[in-house]
Image (tube, grey):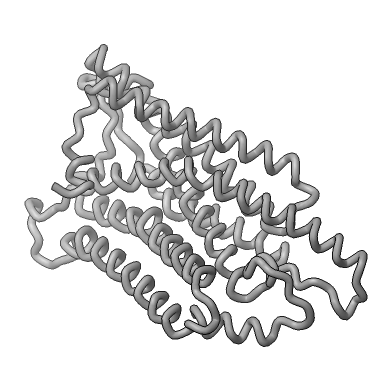
Amino acid sequence: MTLCEMFARYRFDNDAVNMVWLSLHLFGIFVNYYGISALKLNWKRLGNVKILLATNIFSNIASLLLHLHKPVNALVHSSSGIQWNFGEFLCTFLPSITNLTMAASTVSFTGIILEQYYKRIYHSELSLKNLENVVVLIWAWAGIISAPQFCECGSHEFLREAQMCLPPWYTDRKGLVYESVRLILQYAFPIAVAASAFFKDQIVQLTSDGYSQVAQCACISVNTCAAIFLAAVIYTYPVPLLRPFATNHALVDISGAMSCMEFLTVVCCIVVPFEVVAIIGEEVSGGKLHSRIRGDEDDDDLLDLNTFRANGKVHFGTTDDVDEKRLVTCA
């Protein structure tokens, strides 16, 4: 049984599991609040990346707070037997806005990992204007993905007699195609890109310049694995729905995959703030070192701070030779 099949068959009447699920959400909110405190304390000493970090932290908190309705509803359902306990209005509104914030959270943590990878490879920070454009693109991406859910074609339907809140498009071919595309754009693609950049960043750190061919082969393997993962998701969900002459019996069950990806997103909302705090520590300590050395050295011998962050050592002079080596190591 695959992980997604387990999510599809999971019964939400296990109070112990739901309490653990609820506790994870609350712990994630606390961790992200700690991230906010670290950002607020060091805001003036951070570089341009701070706006990207803040975007991720706030989208994480919004995602966890809104997604909290699922474990709470499951706990109430186990005692009352009612499938949906938040009324007709929230049935139409809550799932859509939850997906919007979760999409922003997923894409923003992908942006953080890519920014760190870019800094490691090219030894330079993105400009403030570029990072502002990235934040706009994050919310534009999330808005486009979730837009159909805010219109009539995608709104959840409240079944008053059964006390259920269901997305009616799950039984329609066009709706399932949209859900499959959302599965790819909101979850699979950002996660694949983030995982690829993260592992390549680790390869760059662990591999010395003398083993550039080994690092390059490792990076190619990472890219290949990410491409295979995306191809598998595309082949499993959108492709069967787009085949001509497919009957209603050929409609795929995407609910398990969605639940699986939501679980991964919640886990990322809990884990990523620790990386954010680590980035803040590197930015602050690196900035102090830069200021200290700049006060003692001539302008021609300034410390290349980006190289220090990338390699963990001091480098004086230009970075052209370092950039060339690093680009060969893991493109």
Q: Residue at x 39, y 75 (%)?
A: 218
Q: Residue furthest top?
A: 80
Describe residue 26's horizontal placement relative to residue 37 as left or right.
left
Q: Residue at x 55, y 67 (%)?
A: 117
Q: Is residue 81 visible?
A: yes
Foreground residue, 74 or 298? 298
Q: Residue at x 28, y 69 (%)?
A: 228
x and y percentages locating residue 322 in the rendered image: 65, 82
x and y percentages locating residue 181 in the rendered image: 32, 58
Foreground residue, 315 or 188? 315
Q: Residue at x 74, y 59 (%)?
A: 286
Describe residue 54's horizontal placement relative to residue 91 as left or right.
right
Q: Residue 223 appears in which quarter of the rendering?
A: bottom left
Q: Residue 122 appears in which quarter of the rendering?
A: bottom right
Tag count: 0
Describe residue 50's horizontal placement relative to residue 107 as left or right.
right
State whether residue 279 is above or below residue 66: below
Q: Residue 7 appears in which quarter of the rendering?
A: top left
x and y percentages locating residue 167 in the rendered image: 28, 39
Q: Is residue 126 visible?
A: no
x and y percentages locating residue 63 in the rendered image: 48, 38
Foreground residue, 119 or 160? 119
Describe residue 300's horizontal placement relative to residue 48 as left or right.
right
